[in-house]
Amino acid sequence: MSAPEAIIVEDIRPLIAFVAPLVGVFGIAWAGEKRKNLRETFTFLVAIIQASAVLSMIPILMSGKIIEFHIWQVFTHVPLLLRVDGFGLLFACVASVLWIATTLYAIGYMRGLHEHAQTRFYSFFAISLSATMGVAFSSNLLTIYFFYEMLSVSTFPLVTHMQDKEARTGGRTYLGYLLFTSLCLLLPALSWCYVWLDEGNVAMDFLADTGKVGAFGQSTQIILLCLFTFGFAKAGIMPLHSWLPGAMVAPTPVSALLHAVAVVKVGVFCVIRVYADIFGLEVLQNMDGEDWMIAIACATILISSLIALSQDNLKRRLAFSTIGQLGYVVLGATLATEQGVGGSVLHVAMHACGKITLFFCAGAIFVASGKKYVSELRGLGRKMPITMGAFMIGSLSVIGLPPLGGFISKWYLALGALDRDAVWVVVVLLLSSLLNVFYLLPVAVTAFFRTEEKENDTGFKEAPLGNME
Amino acid sequence: MFEDGTIFNELFIERLNYIIYVILLLIGLHGMIAKNNLIKKLIGMSIFQTAIILFYVSVGVKEGATIPIYLPEHDPHGSHVTNLEENSSSEESHGPVALDADLVKGYANPLPHVLMLTAIVVGVATLGLALALCQKIYQGYGTIEEDELLTKIERQEMRSNPSVAIKSMDSSKMTTVKLEKSVSKPKVSSSPSTQRPNAKLKAEAKTDSSTTKVKTSRVKSVSSKTKPMASKSTTTGSRASKSTTTGSRKSSAKPNTAASQSRTKAKPKPKAKPKASAQKTTASKLKSRTPKK
Amino acid sequence: MMENAIAWILIFPLFGSVACAILRMGKRKICYPVAVLSMVGALWGGIETLMQVVASEEYTVSYIFGGWTLDSYPRGVGIEFHADILSILITLVVLGVGLIVALYSKLPVMEETPGKESIFYTLFLLQVTGLAGICLTGDAFNLYVLIEVAALTGYGLIAMGSKRAAAATFNYVILGTIGASLYLLGVGYIYIKTGTLNMVGIHDVIEANNLADSATMQVAFILVVVGILIKMAFFPFHAWLPNAYCNAPTVTSSLLAPLVTKVMIYVMIRMLLSVFGVDFSFELTLWTDFMPWLVVVAIVCAAVMALAQREIKRMLAYLIVAEVGYMVGGVWIYNYYGMIGSIFHVISDACMTLCLFLGAGLILRKAKTTHFDGLRGLFSKMPLTMTGFFIGGFSIIGLPPTCGFFSKWYLITGGMVSQRWEYLVVLMFSTMVMVVLFFRLIERIHLAVSESGENLGHGHGDLGLTEEQTRFDEGPLSMLIPLILAASVVLIVGIYNQDVVNLIKIFLAEFNLPKGVDY
């Protein structure tokens, strides 16, 4: 994203952001189940260290510098290199700040439900956040791949946290999809880039090697593009999306941070990186079959929105909504225009904030009332006005109403589509926004305006304060 | 036919040693792979190794050559020692000395033979080890026939592996139940005799927890065999008596079917008797086992 | 003493084994420290030799036994120990694995083969001597002898196992003898044609006299390669391996499983590259056309059979067969990167197989079974063991930063460059099979899923385990520490893969392997 002539500074802060959670794991594991407060203090501490390390890098970046940290030489020309640029920092900021919020929320949630194995939960949560930072600060494809795999494996215990049959099925789909794509599609694509460009002298670097793929023939480029797009299955592009609804068996904090922010955003982050910094926008624009990728992204948006309409389970509905929103981000990247990519970068941040609110609300509803289904929510707005109010705001943002964040990113996406003279994409955008309205608003509407059928259930009130964002 | 240059000559006379070693090799290979008896396999292995030794030795043969023992000027006294000293001083090596090419001509090549000494040693070691293994196998399984060995190993694995054992037990139950169905009419009188060992069996199954799983499982299967037998025998016995009464009634009505009726009557007796005797034998077997414990 | 370091590699375990044999009278307990000490000494010799090799000009260290010269043509008749970078790397792997297993062996040997400790350690050290010798020797016939030394001691070690081990060993004896004898026959043909047994000498003669076209050398090539393929348990010849490793004592399988097949792959690489030469092996024979397809069949069959297993050790044994397929394929796709991948995979596979077998040994000790049924919820009982075991598993799957990832990376790269898509596809296939295998285990161990696919608890974290099953109960430290050591070696080899690969690249520099693609 940044101009190549920017000054490069060596700084340890990206490493701190990456390593702090890993070190914190030892503290969390040491504190264990018996010293709950200490354990959660550790989690907090680590989250705050990470966030402050990330935030403190903003001024340096604002002054037009780029931060680098060399960890270790992997292959002859490829180092494991952390580099902080604008896009990465934006993503890292969102993830790390939301982690603090999620930790707060998770403490309330996990204690509220008396969950088992909380130490394991917090440990792997920290590891996955560390991996997320790694992805955000990666400087080349191989580095990104490392942290990507780390994230896949470290979230498995979180997904299967419930340890029952449902969790197992979810975990199987989750790992099956993610490892299959990363090992069987991504790895060959990486080695293809590594070898066939200039006899392995390419570092697959996001700064230096942009556009070198253009040396390939057209068909090879298309194959590579497909391998990359579908290889990063965390992006949830349509034929490879079904791991995400499966992963919803995880506890809500996991769904909220990982499956609305960290994991899926890592997927689209990687896709944008590959599109913008490996292929380069020019190469993409000149590619013949690139329109097909736009079509796939659009199809993902529409189909997932339609599926979301039919889901009654609130978390599953949100999951399909996430797939649709990820479609927007990928769409922006496939448009391969400055505006489009800018739009998708913005959308990463905007959707993260919007969707995590929605998930928190879903979790809060579950903790307070034990309700999982949309049809059960009637009249809930009266009992939990703050929660449902937050849900409303989140919905509106995701839908993209003008004063809220979602609107800006969608606006840029539309501009990008117009740049490419793809009016039909704009139509798809409008249509899908309409669908968003249909599947999100009824939730809040049901809660506020339908009276509850059975009033004498239980006198539950607002969720614990920790659950409020 | 045997002049120089004919194909026959080239293939079979000049290379006779190769042909023989290949034949031996194949015989050995056949023995190792196809023979059922482990000792025969080892004989095959020996032939196999011998073939290779033969090949090496025949390669080292040279017509009219002598044993490769170096005798400088055939004079073991005096000159040999000086010769060695000279060499060691000039070449600064205390190792062996290379001879001129024309001096070597009269000797056979010693190296293949020397190599084969090592190979023979290796072969003997292998054979000894394999024979020891055979002995161990015979001690363990009581056979050195490969097919018998395999079935015995399989049987043992079934016993040692609980899940497989359970499966096999299930299948044995199935078959016994089927057998009972096929043997439709046991004697009513046999039921007390079956019940008594049944109770004993239970007691035994309870008491001897020290016996292996296999035994208890077998005992269980036997008891499960006898239990339904006892209950069924009463019901089927009564049913049989009913059928005989109806049969007698019918026979009075239709005399030409009497022969077939008598056949059905006659049938249960010879069938039930061996069954009962078999049960007795099992019971006696079990009795004989119980005092042991 | 320093300049003889290469000889010390063999002398330490050799004399250690003699000492153990003598100690049979009475003091059996001393055998364990003797074994460990001689392994430490050998490892020291190995590291010292590696230093010498790297420091030397041509990256080789030559050591001639008995003061014979190599000056005459064809190169010498004396036995030469010839350490170049490849051989010393593999030797170090052998010695390292030997040391870790020796450390591990204290309790299992005492319990599984009571009263036979001295014999066991005698054979153990001889086995290591044989394997290290195979790597170091520069003489084709000497190689045969050392192969047989390793094999004979291996038979003995395996036969000490369960009752069934004897029958399994017998099969191994038969197949192993066929393999070694075929190799010996091939060496005979080489000797007929070249008049020398020295590996470098053979190569020189082949180059000088252009012997590549001769039928004799072709026959020799086929005999040697087929013999080695039988010895390394390449797929159709694998039948001896699973039974032998399953029924062997824990220590034996932990020593043999990582080393025997890998050392034989080293022998194959040595024969193809250094003895017959690249042109002879790859250009003038048709093997490069069909070997990758054989490899495809081998990997698919081995992977499918591994899927069918319900017992950890047996499953691992089939995984070894599949891994052998990887490495053979990496060699025969005839490519620079594939060769790097193969050599590096020899190293990393030894590390991760060691890790897995040590873990399996600990599981066997605590859970009394390695059958999948017995694994429910073991993670809460022995977390450290399981972590070590799974690091090995992740390495086999090929997840970074374990060493398995890097070797697989080079293998994939090699398949790409030489455009052997079938090899690439089968690599992907077996990777997925391994994901299934290990995450199935993780489900059993972590989620306590039983054989029927249910866990017996009532949801929400209740695993249906008794108190005793979840109590923290790790294995003894003398076994746990080697496992952790092995797991950290897997990670360290992964992290420092660049250094290893650079060494391999130095070794491969003199061979004319195709590097890139004419794209």
Image (cartoon, coloured by chain):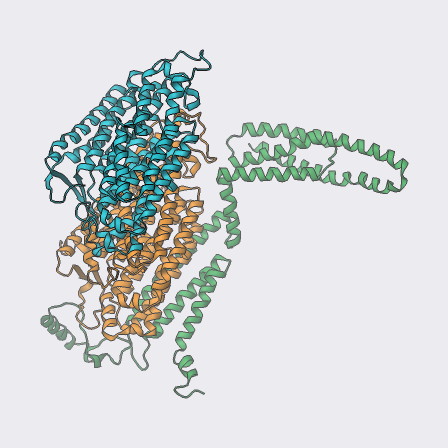
Chain colours: A cyan, B green, C orange
- Residue in the picture at 55% in, 40% down: B168
Asked whether the viewer can see residue C324, the reply is no
Q: Count up the numbered dots.
A: 0
Residue A451 horizontal side relative to residue A77, left or right: right
Q: Nearer the viewer, residue C322 or A445?
A: A445
x and y, in percent, of residue C242 in the image: 41, 49
Residue A444 horizontal side relative to residue C102, left or right: right
Residue C284 sits in which quadrant? bottom left
Placement of the C terminus of chain B among the 4 image quadrants: top right
Position of residue A193 relative to residue A392, above or below, is below
Residue B1 sits in which quadrant? bottom left
Position of residue C279 relative to residue C376, above or below, is below
Asked whether the viewer can see residue B202, the reply is yes
Position of residue C403 relative to residue B166, above or below, is below
Residue A229 sits in which quadrant? top left
x and y, in percent, of residue B25 in the image: 42, 68
- Residue in the picture at 41% in, 52% down: C300
x and y, in percent, of residue B88 in the image: 12, 70
Q: Nearer the viewer, residue C89 or B272?
A: C89
Position of residue C147 relative to residue A458, above or below, is below
Q: Nearer the viewer, residue A356 or C50?
A: A356
Residue A251 horizontal side relative to residue C62, left or right: right
